[in-house]
Image: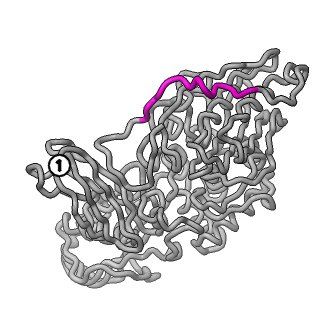
Amino acid sequence: MATWTRTLAVTAGATALVVTGNVASHLLAAEPEAAPPDALAADPLAADLDAILDDPRLDGGQASVVVRDAATGETLYEHDGDQRLMPASNEKLLTSAVALDVLGPDHTFATTVATAGQRTGPILRGDVYLRGTGDPTLLASDYADLAAQLAADGVRVVSGRVLADDTWFDDVRLGNDWMWDDEAYYYAAPVSALTVAPDTDYDAGSVIVNVDPGAAAGAPAVVTLTPHTDAVTIVNEATTGTRNAVSVEREHGTGRIVVSGTVAAGGSGASEWASVEEPTDYAADVFVKALAAEGVRVTGGIGRGVTPSGATVVAEHESMPLSELMVPFLKLSNNGHAEVLIKAMGREVSGAGTWSAGLAVLRAELADYGVDTATVANRDGSGLSRRNLIPAAELADLLVAAQDRPWFDAWYEALPIAGASDRMVGGTLRSRMAGTSAAGNVHAKTGSLTGASALSGYVDDADGRRLVFSIVFNDHLSSKPSDLEDRIAVRLALHSETEAARVTSVDITAVELPDDVECSWVKAC
């Protein structure tokens, strides 16, 4: 398996997941020595799952695994189910479910342009306020639409400033306990109530750095940004050479993005995503550029401000509903979406768009799912913090209880689906369990951090009975043991109440994935 590093290494074109062939060496580990033959015969499912977990890669590590009947909640299998472990992105199961309860599936995020100034023909005399409420899906084209609305009203000059109003949330940009060396990467982008997404994955708070070859070998590479913005400073040290070997790195604590290495002459170039330092200023800059494109000149520049209570709204944009946002959020394991939802819940319930207020709402609501919050630590909404802790049994509780919610069907479909090649269907499971009884069957959330891997969700067994499962691995020193999660899921898909013998071979293919992050975070799925 290839080694994935946490540098912003650029590859040409889309990165493909590589199927490396049948995994012959880890189909099922040896049976536990202490299990008597009659016990194995009595519960072949338990024996098979025990054998999968008896893998040397888990020696010295921790595994928490629970399988339940989805309809009754009956536990069919448990291995250290009460062990508190780091869930990685399985934390998003909690955040997404509670957000649908608190905010509602029809919740939208509004972005407005307002002014308290006066019109004199084509001149708007006064400041213009660009106000956000956390929409993580705002594209440059949406800011262009806001600008077009203002221009369509006949405004040609703003005799004042464009003031960015991000006060719907607080100004704490980075989540609790996030690692400083993640700061440059778009999966750890700063959170603001006013931001920009560069693409329809809705990677809010990031830019796409495009690196193309120059006119000839040895010439400087050509670096552009999507969207175009002056909110970051590009330091271009890259040259045109014989191969793509480009690094894109935002310097810690600054808005400087350094591009170095080489890009292949005559090639198609390469692209990488990088976080911006200050998403609010980024949004204001993109909006002012959109105004200029519409022939609207701003004389006073850009600043920050709070929209006056009596201001008149002159342009507005409303996001997709939360039920639709669940698709890119959960399929692609988008961290920024999770953190926006945490702050939005805090704002909704207590009037404070903060992590602390939102996490308090999360914990209060989890009790309605039967989750014992005394056994759970919640530090953020995405799972990027390494101080989140939850037992697999509590994740299973949530999955069982969620089935009774009115929004469950949409949430279930928003989860990644095993072996579904369309990335907005399969998501982070699009190349896993393909060609097995789990393909198109398993709907589950992945989770990946260094030393942590998880998979929790739903599978229909061979009898058509729906099962809930939660698998959380921690403290492994090997490459990510996601193939063990897949074997468990496939074995559950094969399960039948009438089975009398063990399944001694669960044949899956190995997939090349990054070891320490979700595959979607490096655009590998």
Q: Amino acid at mark 1?
A: Gly
Q: Residue 139 is drawn in which quadrant?
A: bottom left
Give the x, y percent position of residue 458.
67, 35
Magenta residues: mostly which secondary structure? loop
Q: Which residues are magenta?
A: 17-30
* Image coordinates for residue 299, horizontal then vertical, percent: 21, 81
The residue furthest left is 215
Q: Quadrant of residue 153?
A: bottom left
Queried whether the magenta region covers residue 312, the answer comes back as: no
Residue name at image x 20 percent, y 71 percent: 296
Tell me the residue that label 1 is attached to.
241
Q: Is residue 525 left or right of residue 387?
A: left
- Foreground: 481 or 446? 481
Q: Is residue 320 above or below residue 32?
A: below
The quarter of the image holding the C terminus is top left
Res 327 visible: no
Q: Nearer the viewer, residue 138 or 435?
A: 435
Name the residue at 29% across, 56% down: 209
